[in-house]
Amino acid sequence: MQGFSRFLTYRLVRMLIALWCVVTVVFIVMRLSGDPVPLLLPPDAPIAEMERLRHEMGLDRPIYVQYGVFVTQALQGDFGRSIHFRTSAMTVVWERVPATLELAFASFLCAVVVAIPAGVLSAVKRGSTYDNIVMGVALVGQAAPTFYIGIMLILTCSLWLGLFPTSGRGEWRHLVLPAVTLGAFAMASIARITRSAVLEILRADFIRTARAKGLPEFWTIAKHTMRNAAIPIVTIVGLQLGNLLGGAVVTETIFSWPGIGRLAIQSIYSRDYPIVQSCVFITAAMFVVLNFLVDLAYGILDPRIRR
């Protein structure tokens, strides 16, 4: 128990350090993006008015004072006021988070349900026609750009066949094409890693012993193989879920999905920096928390890692 507590504390400290690094990077990027004051005033605003607004925003203070204020406000969830929406930037972003989570988890579920069984069967039937087809499809899924997959799905499934809407968020039919588009790369990656992990375990001596004792092949795979192959599979699954949460920008833009990725793109075009900073922080925080949960799963699956 003491070893697991030390393991948990170490991972938690790493997570907090990563979040602090994210806040610092957001602060630096905000300063490198330029002075936001001219965006808030008319082009012909007098210099005195610009200096007054700069003083109200605290931009005339020393950089280390600005950093301290920024970190303090970030810890309270305050990343400033949106230039476009005229309200708290974090409030605007949180309104879009449910749409991104819905899309990410639908893509994740689709990828896991399809990829893990396909990867296991591909490893069991190594060298067969099924194996070649699955790995060929996985290779295409990893190589094809997300925007290309999305456009082709819109062209075939929406315009030609009329099965699904081309854009928007509403009923379940609106979710199918974005979820498949976003989950295509994750599905291919998980399938390939699962196949490699299972193949490595199938060559182990204890698998030969289990088969020699007459244990059914199903139980050999389910009980012995999958348990020992779980670490790399959990790793790729956790990383892909984080990528799905943070990498939905292209998919949300193609399908006009009202998530934080599309909001970030729109805010970059309109130079609404508080919104962009809030989107970056929330996405990074979700990714860091997911990595923390993956580390915990390591400790549960393999007690040796706790040491």
Image: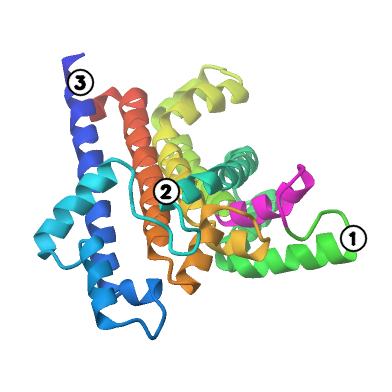
Is 183 contained in the magenta span? yes
Distance, label 1 to label 3, CA atoms, is: 56 Å
Marks 2 and 3 sit apart, C-alpha to C-alpha, by 34 Å
In front: label 2 or label 3 = 2
Q: Residues within 10 Å of mark 2 (few under 14, many from 20)?
A: many
- Report which residue position mark 3 lands on: 5
Residues 56 and 140: in front is: 56
Q: Residue sitting at 49 percent across and 57 percent down? A: 247
Contact (Cβ within 8 Å) of mark 1 with mark 2: no
Q: Quadrant of the C terminus?
A: top left
Region rendered in magenta: 168-185
Q: Where is residue 10 in the image (x, y as percent from the top left)?
A: 18, 32
Amino acid on which the number 3 mark rests in the picture: Ser
Give the percent coordinates (x, y) of residue 188.
Answer: 57, 53
- Measured along the vertical axis of the image, is residue 97 above or below residue 83? above
Which amino acid, by three-letter code, is at mark 2? Met
Near-viewer residue (79 or 244): 79
Tell me the number on the disc at residue 221.
Answer: none
Task: Give the farthest residue toward the bottom.
Answer: 44
Badge 1, how many Cα within 10 Å: few under 14, some, many 20+?
A: few
In space, the residues marked 1 and 2 are separated at their CA atoms by 40 Å
Q: Name the residue under label 1.
A: 161
The answer to which image quadrant residue 125 occupies is: top right
Q: What element carries label 2?
A: helix
